[in-house]
Image (cartoon, rainbow, N blue to C red):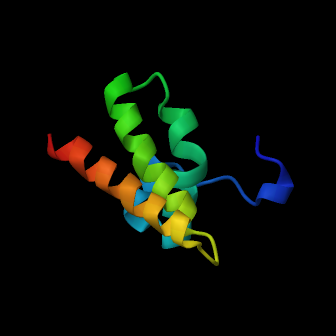
Amino acid sequence: MIPTYLGRSPRNIIHHHNGYKAEEWAAWITMYSLPLLKGRMPKKHYEGWAYFVKAVCLCQKSTLTDEELNNIQLLFRLFYNYYEM
């Protein structure tokens, strides 16, 4: 059960991913994916996915410092390099 201040429960990603809106994907990536995927995928893949999640979380801020922009670039590069190997 999700507290009402967090909004409504997410639609089941297995059944509705084709119709997910950008807001739903953002919520899935930033709030649900890491807790729900932990222990359900190899640790190595989980760690690679975590780079992407952290970068997306930072990207959602309304203002970014130069340090945050550099961190976002680094996280996306780590994610890219992880999956290119």
Residue lying furthest front in this view? 67
Q: Position of residue 4 (x, y in %)?
A: 84, 55
42 over 84 or under it: above or below: above
80 over 67 or under it: above or below: above
Task: Confirm whether residue 21 shows in the render.
Answer: no
What residue lies at 76% left-to-right and 60% top-to-bottom? 7
Q: Is residue 81 left or right of residue 31?
A: left
Which image quadrant is residue 35 in?
A: top right
Q: In which quadrant is the N terminus drawn? A: top right
Q: Position of residue 40 (x, y in %)?
A: 42, 25
Residue lying furthest left in this view? 85
Task: Confirm whether residue 12 shows in the render.
Answer: yes
Q: Is residue 60 left or right of residue 9?
A: left
Q: Is residue 61 left or right of residue 44?
A: right
What residue lies at 58% left-to-right and 69% top-to-bottom? 60
12 over 20 or under it: above or below: above
